[in-house]
Amino acid sequence: MLFAIHALDRAGALPIRLANYDAHKAFLSDTSRFGVKIVMSGPLVSDDGERMIGSLFLIEALGRSEVEAFNQADPFAAADIWEKVTITGFLRRQG
């Protein structure tokens, strides 16, 4: 099953985001311990494309609990960067 994680940053979180960026990237390099696979991910940006305002992940996992554990272990979550996180599951259409 696929899951989308849509995470919006708190106001003023950019300096904290940048300070934790290397730890976040290292965390994303091996997700096997959570039983999830990142299909794609990247920062959300402001409409003018000038600043990062959140994160978007497309995750393949057996269930929501694995995705939640993965998301909660992210250094960005530990740094309390995100104001709002939404996890939504959807079925992949074949053909």
Image: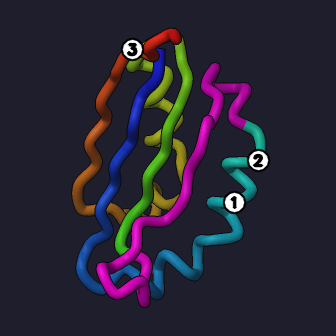
In-image side of 32 versus 13 (left or right): right
Q: Residue visible at 47% across and 87% down? A: 15
Residue linked to disc 3: 91
Q: Residue visible at 39% across and 42% down? A: 5
- Mark 3 or mark 1: which is in front? 3
Residue found at the far front of this picture: 95
- The front one of 31 and 40 is 40
Please give the range of residues in magenta.
Answer: 31-52
How dense is the environment of label 2, judged by Cα within 10 Å: few (below 14), some, or many (20 and up)? few
- The front one of 62 and 39 is 39
Residue linked to disc 2: 29
Rounded to the nearest angstrom, the CA distance separating label 3 from label 1 is: 27 Å
Mark 1 element type: helix
**Residue 25 got which mark?**
1
Is residue 20 covered in magenta? no
| Residue 33: % across, % down | 70, 26
Mark 2 element type: loop
In the rendered image of this protein, does residue 16 appear above or below residue 50?
Answer: above
- Mark 3 or mark 2: which is in front? 3
Q: Residue visible at 34% across and 54% down? A: 7
- For badge 2, the amino acid type reads Ser
| Residue 24: % across, % down | 63, 60
First in residue order: circle 3 vs circle 1: 1
